[in-house]
Image (cartoon, coloured by chain):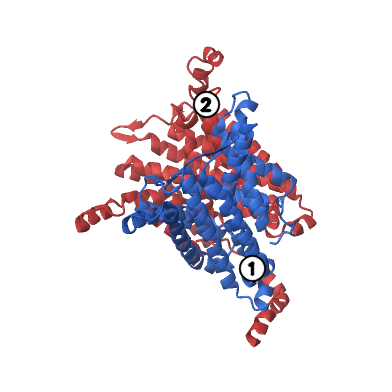
Chain colours: A red, B blue
Amino acid sequence: MLNKQTHLIGFLVAAVLLLAMPLGLQIVGDAWVRIAAFALLYIMLALGLNIVVGLAGLLDLGYIAFYAVGAYSFALLSSNQLTSNFDALGAMFPNGFDVSIWLIIPLGAGLAATFGIILGTPVLKLRGDYLAIVTLGFGEIIRIFMNNLNAPVNITNGPQGISGIHGVRMFGWDLNRNISIGNYTITSVTQYYWLFLALVTLTVIICYRLQDSRIGRAWMAMREDEIAAKAMGINTRNMKLLAFSMGATFGGVAGVMFAAFQGFVSPESFSLMESINVLAMVVIGGMGNIPGVILGAILLSVLPEALRYTGFISDWQQHAFNHVYVDTGILRQLIYSMAMILVMLIRPKGLWPAPEHGKGMAALALGQSKAVHAVPAVVKEGA
Amino acid sequence: METFIQQIVNGLVLGSMYALIALGYTMVYGIVNLINFAHGDVMMVGALTAYSMFLLLAHIAPGLPGWLTVVLATIVAMIVCGVLNYFIERLAYRRLRNAPKLAPLVTAIGMSILLETLAMVIWGRDYKVFPSLLPSKIINIHGVVITPVQVMILVLTAVLLLGLTYLIHKTKLGRAMRATAENPRVAALMGVNPNLVISAAFVIGAMLAAIAGVMWYANFSTANFYMGFTPGLKAFTAAVLGGIGNLTGAMLGGVLLGVIEVLGAGYIGTLTGGMFGSNYQDIFAFIVLILVLTLRPQGLLGERVADRA
């Protein structure tokens, strides 16, 4: 009973801290609230990818495509991009498109899910690494189209991207406007942070519920052994498609939020490196473990930003050698890449791996076969 | 007709370079089941090492003939890349051989970023132009033009592919590699040293990549720290297209991919009535890959293996 109470108190304290955090960061500067808001977006993305990679065991290297689909759906439906390039639309909507967020979120999510199924269908029969390259190719195809669909008709405005995207407005609340209470201002970035926090909370709840559901167990069974899962009556085809579309949905919603938050989208934000980055968050945090994935997302999104503040090392080099050998940008990449390698070498299962459900039992049951495996080693020693 | 043959020639040249890089991917994958994401960057290191050698040789031996400079630079690049890839395997992959499959993938990605950053520190961010060391007189055969560099690429690739086939099928090391790829445990029991075989695969793959890097540099006449990314990606696609782990498949996949890409970029404009241009060149590789894998999930020449968990 007491345990439950402390849990509740801990939970409430964490909630208050998370809600109050941007107000504190605001004092240091909006830039840090922005970083926190982006960390939340990456948590959403990483949790979505965790469904595909961590739970269902399908290696997806093109996940960012779904993020892009969401972002571009919002960008097109909430800016002047289409109305200024198509006269007929321009005549109908002289002030540009301004579709309600309540319509765009389901639309973006649905579109991303559809793309998830489009991607999933041809790759159903593929094994691990074949799947990786096909999903990678899919991500690249989407990006190349976004980069080039400015001719013959201008839809995505090509590499320049779409700017002037409206912010989120709901219940008469415009998140792009600062709120002033007396002398105190709650900036727009902080308001977005709260919106993202709410969405992340929802995502986490959905992920936990999914993981403990019949579907989640089916995914994990499929991940461990596809043939055995099939033999147990799991429809692996539908389960794979469901994993792809579920993961894509989260990516799509995160993309919608990204476009609204940035006010600008361009194909550059959806490169292969971004997909890889999100995958690294999942793997480094601890594949298949929700708190681990959240940790990974926070670390890998905040670390590169924090490393921007290493200017003092350049100053020091200037001071010591009269020359800057390694500038901040390079240093940041060096530390980032080495951290990636070292974390994996030291903790191959990630920083916070999933507890091994029932593996203890499995090891007991497998005791016999383990003895068989040990034989070659004995023979080798003898020889 | 001339343009068609011209496109085929250009495609073969591009495909040869893809094939050389793809071999490195496929050899490593065949033996340790790892996608060595840093492989494209090893190729970049090869090209930039050759650049440094050009500078050095021009300084210490100014009278050296151009072709000899290129040969010497290529040999040094091969050695540097071989040693580099050996240490990459030792440091980043060996410890993770029995770890969950995605762990070495992430270290490989980290290695790729690390190599690019280090190259940026050593060689800077700018494009290095290939000096005029090789004959540049264009050969014209009935309207089809080909440069001496391209002829060299085609001939050298053919020689290297034959040499590698010989190595894999006729030598002791090749037999050890095939045995380890088939079943590492049994191979080890038969007296094959798996560490040696794996290192050999990494070193040979890196040497081929170094040659491909110098070729790429000579053909497109620029090199910088980021040049390895796209060829690496395409070569990986080629390796999968041919059936990853299969050497002949990697060669076939590379050449096919090069030809398809050039033909696609050349004809998409006329086929779609100007709707899409050659800026869509990069999607052909992936579209072909998806189509082929839908019909043949194991790749063109891959074997159908049971799913191993």
Q: Position of residue B153 (x, y in %)?
A: 55, 49
Q: Which amino acid type is shown beneath numbered disc 2? A: Asn
Q: Position of residue A258 (x, y in %)?
A: 48, 37
Q: For mark 1, give the secondary structure.
A: helix
Q: Is residue A216 visible?
A: no
> Subunit of mark 2?
A
Assess disc 1: are there few (<14), some (14-19) or many (≥20) residues with their C-alpha within 10 Å of its C-alpha: some
> Subunit of mark 1?
B
Q: Is residue A371 visible?
A: yes
Q: Which amino acid type is shown beneath numbered disc 1? A: Gly
Marks 2 and 1, Cα distance to the nearest angstrom? 51 Å
Contact (Cβ within 8 Å) of mark 2 with mark 1? no
Q: Quadrant of residue B189?
A: bottom right
Say which mark, if any, is on residue B161.
none
Residue at screen point 69% across, 81% down: A375
The outermost residue toward the top is A91
> Of A28 and A140, which appears nearest the observer?
A140
Q: Position of residue A119 (x, y in %)?
A: 66, 41
- Which residue does the numbered mark 2 point to in the structure image? A150
* Above or below A86: residue A323: below
- Which residue does the numbered mark 1 point to in the structure image? B174
Q: For mark 2, give the secondary structure.
A: loop
> Of A97 and B95, which appears nearest the observer?
B95
